[in-house]
Amino acid sequence: MTQQTIDKVLQFRDDRNWKQFHNPKDLAISISLEAAELLEVFQWSAQDVVCQDKMDKIREELADVLCYSILMADACGLDLDEIIQQKVERNCKKYPVDKAYGNKDKYTELKG
């Protein structure tokens, strides 16, 4: 994600004077609600992995999750690049390639 995209989301918020309503609790709730709407796209789907005909709704709901995530990071004073890079580094340690490659097990269950 580019800084330009992040700035556009923040500018949208600021143009409407909504920052005053964006506390971490309410933003966390909003992220969860939007994630549930993304999950709803697949509810009662006979073929859970088929999503081509649902792509418009997936794009819309995923964008909502990401926008609220940007707003949450801003409200908490977090740098998105930094926290994502740190998370990937932690996951690399928890899921080393030699143990996790092609394996869906949780890191506590990895063998080898």
Image: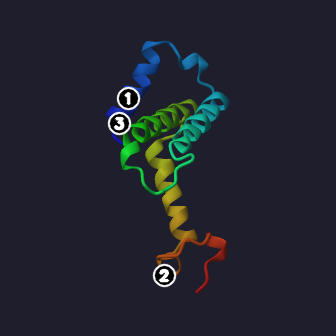
- Marks 2 and 3 sit apart, C-alpha to C-alpha, by 35 Å
Judging by the rendered image, the residue that carries numbered circle 1 is: 7
Q: Which residue is drawn at 54% across and 19% down?
A: 19
Point out residue 74 in the picture as x, y percentages from the top left corner: 51, 32
Which mark is first along the chain, 3 or 2?
A: 3
Of the residues tagged 2 and 3, which is closer to the observer? Answer: 2
Q: In this view, does 48 lie to the left or right of 33?
A: left
Q: Which residue is drawn at 50% across and 12% down?
A: 17
Which amino acid is tagged 3? Gln
Point out residue 60 in the picture as x, y percentages from the top left corner: 42, 35
Which amino acid is tagged 2? Asp
Q: Which residue is drawn at 58% across and 16% down?
A: 20
Of the residues tagged 1 and 2, which is closer to the observer? Answer: 2
Report helix, strand or loop for mark 2: helix
Which amino acid is tagged 1? Asp
Q: Is residue 49 left or right of residue 2?
A: right
In the picture, the disc for residue 3 is 3
- Marks 3 and 1 sit apart, C-alpha to C-alpha, by 6 Å
Judging by the rendered image, the residue that carries numbered circle 2 is: 98
Of 26 and 83, nearer the camera is 26
